Image: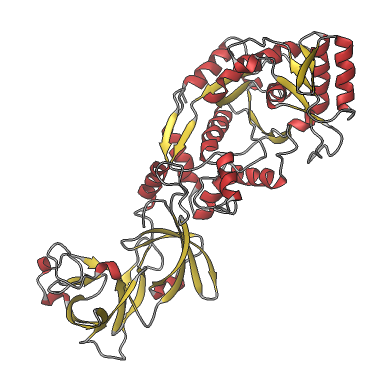
Amino acid sequence: MNNFITNIIDNDINNGLSINNIKFRFPPEPNGFLHLGHIKSLYINFTLAKFYNSKIYLRFEDTNPNNINIKYINQIIKNIKWLGFKYTKITYISNYFNLLYKWAKLLIIKQKAYIQKIYNNKIYNINNIEKSLFIFKNMKIGKYKENTYILRAKINNKSTNYYLNDPIMYRIIYKKHLFTKNKWCIYPTYDWAHGQSDYIEKISHSLCSIEFQNHKPLYDWFINQIYNKKFNYIKPKQIEFSRLNLSNTITSKRQINILKNKKIINNLCDPRLCTITAFKKKGYSSKYIINFIKSIGYSKRNNNINIKLLELYIKKKIINKTPKLLVIFNPIKLTIINFPKKSIEWIYIKNHCNYPKYKIIPFTKTIYIEKNDFKYKYDKNFLRLSFNNYVRLKYSYIIKIFKIVKKNNNIKKIYCKIYKNNTIKYNKIKSTIQWVSSKYNTKINILLYNYIYFKNNKIINKNSLKSIFVYGDISINNINLYNIYQFHRIGFFYFFKINNNIFYFKKLFFLNP
């Protein structure tokens, strides 16, 4: 492995860092599900940990009690295991609240932090050490209301770097914490707690996406204030890599919450989202997702990725491994005049990449074809079923329209003739269409989805999710759950449930079926 991150780490080793002291972490906030953008960070951190045979912690950044939810913690753990990554142990920033509070007092004593009072919409800075310590203690034991006092770092309130403008370290929040319960009513901010937790855990290299580049001076400043070689001789080093920006999908928690409030989506497993949980429930393979991220590589330059690229990557991987089925979405009925009324002809079909080797489907006097495969008037450019056109039924006969019965300009019946394959010249057949028996078929429910927003990303597509019933050939009765299948000339679908003899599928890609 050779990239700009390993070059930095190798240089640190050459300058005296023991390879045994290399350690990484993946630090999600437990306020939402992981999405495709997180997978790049997961991949980089866990791959480097494996390469250097080092420890890696899964650390939950639970500094804000308003946003913590156990369902997100559990789901993130499941997601990481599903992706095949193994962590050394799970930690929480809340484990370090006592030490963070102690260090905050140290900064007050060093005059590197001060209390700020907010009263009647006016702000007062308290620079006296004893008074600041007294107020900070009273903040901790709950003597003040929310939004009345905060603790700020004293750096440079005129800095051009926003994050160095005397950032907030502690605020009062009266909210029961998931783990510490009611022990605390002041909570550390992310910027104060994040770097110090790296320091406590002896993380050697703090890997993060490029949007945290402006945080780096603050990250280093905080650690320098509390650095004590006896406590920990390793100063974590922040290294930024390119962010994975996604188009044609939604990752913003704010946007997702808007959609939830408008009842456009019910949860973060919605197939229109690109959360890891949604990918899993749509039937995506973790191996293909990881290999796709691997193909993007390491860089400092941001990656702008259309979600279609992931879909095309997966499609390329599965197209020759996916069993095929005959399915009709919009049926139109054909009657075969030269086929016996009560007869059934069983057609043996060699399975495409599936076991058993063959499947059988019934051909009957009446069949369904797709409405889009039929046109009443002859059109030389329309190569499917119309007057004067021969069309091949997939795996079966060649057919041609014999007669169409209309009433009040509505088509009532379509009569066709079938022909043996050797009775028509091969070059006359321009098209092959799918079909199923109208008498013997399988009922299928399909969940279809499209992009939630139209192209300008402002107008919500209220019809982006729908459920429909279609007809499938009876070989579907023998297929396996949790597998991907290709519907002829339609697309790829994931079979995830059977209930009351109804087979339930989900569309696999945003790409049109």
In the image, what residue occupies the spot 59% across and 14% down? Answer: 161
Residue 243 horizontal side relative to residue 89, left or right: left
Number of numbered labels in the structure image:
0
Residue 248 x, y percent position in the rendering: 43, 42
Q: Is residue 419 something that shows in the picture?
A: no
User: Which of these two is toward me, 106 or 154?
Assistant: 154
Quick check: 418 left or right of 298? left
Please tell me whether residue 498 is drawn above or below residue 463 in the rendered image: below
Judging depth in this view, the residue of 283 and 165 nearest the camera is 165
- Where residue 500 appears, x then y in whole percent? 55, 75
Q: Is residue 23 above or below residue 248?
A: above
Using the rendered image of the protein, determine whether residue 497 is visible from the camera's viewpoint.
Answer: yes
Q: Position of residue 336 (x, y in %)?
A: 24, 84
Q: Which one is in front, 178 or 162?
A: 162
Residue at 42% across / 32% down in the picture?
304
Q: Is the image coloured rainbow, by chain, by secondary structure, or in one colour?
A: secondary structure
The reply, left or right, for residue 79 in relation to residue 467 is: right
Looking at the rendering, in which quadrant would you find the C terminus? Answer: bottom left
Q: Position of residue 168 (x, y in %)?
A: 72, 21
**Residue 8 located left or right of residue 136:** left
Vertical position of residue 215 compared to residue 451: above or below: above
Residue for point 80% across, 30% down: 146
When the figure is inspected, residue 26 is found, relative to residue 238, above or below; the finding is below
